[in-house]
Image: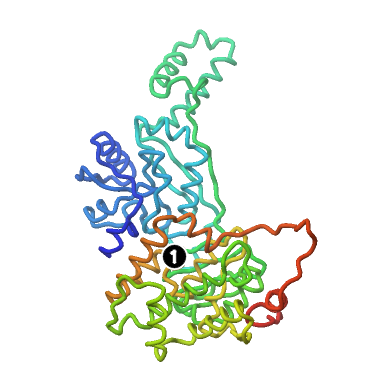
Amino acid sequence: MKRLIQRGLMFGNLFHVSSPALVERYNRALKHLTGKTTKLTDFHIDISGFAPEIGDELNDPAYLNHAGVNRQFILLSTEQKRCPLLNAKFSTSHTILRKFFDDNEAQLFALTARDAVAGELVNSVYAVTTPQRLFDIRAVTVEADTTEGTVQSAEVLAEKVNRFLQEDDAWFDDVLIADMITLAKETGDVRRNPVRLNTMEFKQQNYWTAHFDGLYVFQTVEHPAVISSGPKDVLGDLPIQYVFDLEQRNQIAKFLDYNDLVEPIIKARGVDGVAILKQKMDFILIDAIADQGIDLSQTTRRDMRRLERENAHLLPESYTALGKLVTWAEHGGAWPKISSDHPAYFYTLRATDHADSALVNMVLAELCPADIRQLFICHKDAFYATYAGWPDAKKDYVARFLEREYQVDKAGARAALFGHEANMEDNRGPTVASPSQDLITRVGPWGAVRRR
């Protein structure tokens, strides 16, 4: 993993904790949440306050995520909102923490100026002992306060101030006045500068979880289902309509289609579909020849074409099929029939523009492991696990490619791959589609899909 770490592709964009004041605040919060402290004086934390170095020190990579269910967090600075979430057990956790930052940024800026904010993503389940328990998770609530209880004290002070203003004889209540003075020393003037964190609750409906070898749960679509990365037989009976595993490619294809969750890349608005498919072909080529002892360092586009010619006998069906699709789109060649059980099928798709597009692209990334760019962007856990087993030649190529093509402009790369462009009316009148465009519109790049 050293190649990835050196290029900022692993443990990148973390918040550096090095000042004695921040370390001391972190230790107070860590003691408050877990009863533990760190002896380190220099470490890096993610958006939740998790530090890989402290995980190694404590020999507990889940020291802020006991049982992988209710994630705890330590906030030292609002700068943490730009950090990734490491060791995520639920795909929704990063989104929830980022939303908490955004909705409370001014308050968090004030609170972290002198103390750490500690909290937890709370739901009704404290241990996921069986897959069935996942369906007991209905919502996640964010609970947070400083280690000194500033937010709670401010709420108590606000109640006492209201009582003081509303009760006729409050002026003569020495105990009430003394309490307000004591609390005000901790919180400041709560009337002019309210110390309050918004109560936030998030529904847990469609998500990925790392539990049970990885599960994608879709509960709010028209045809609900669970897609399992491992064998589905070990899951038992689940309270949902359909359960598939990654070996059931036809069923997954139908599920994605029936719920209108995917679209063919070649007809997608806002992206260069042909360029994306050509890049996927390069990734498949590298995957096919990586263990042949070929030097892949400093590989250029011209080298790719040479490698393709020299190793044509090694290229899989998925490469050939994507090549035919590109030829058809560019030059009107023979229309390729790519059915849902074809190895190239899922490489031709991306998520449509809907609330769970990131989750769908995550599923597609796992179904298309040779597409190293989408795997890295959409499913880092699967990427790191797969990367560990690659030959050194492929590791070198992938690390250099991601540093050069993705790391320099992450937002631009995501927009180029997954961006959606709204339909626009052309004031000049309707546009006449070319024969290939018209065929795509009517039947899709793999033929008409029959619905039950």
Q: Quadrant of the C terminus?
A: bottom right
Q: Amino acid at mark 1?
A: His
Relative to 183, residue 105 above or below: below
Q: As rendered, which of 48 and 389 lies closer to the eye?
A: 389
* Residue position for label 1: 379
Relative to 343, residue 132 above or below: above
Q: As rendered, which of 332 and 217 lies closer to the eye?
A: 332
Q: Residues within 10 Å of mark 1 (few under 14, many from 20)?
A: many
Q: Quadrant of residue 396?
A: bottom left
Q: Where residue 198 appears, x then y in whole percent?
A: 53, 37
Tell me the residue at 49%/32% (across/down).
196
Q: Quadrant of residue 225?
A: bottom right
Tell me the residue at 43%/67% (across/down).
373
Q: Where residue 133 appears, x then y in whole percent?
A: 49, 64
Q: Where residue 350 appears, x then y in whole percent?
A: 56, 69
Q: Quadrant of the N terminus?
A: bottom left
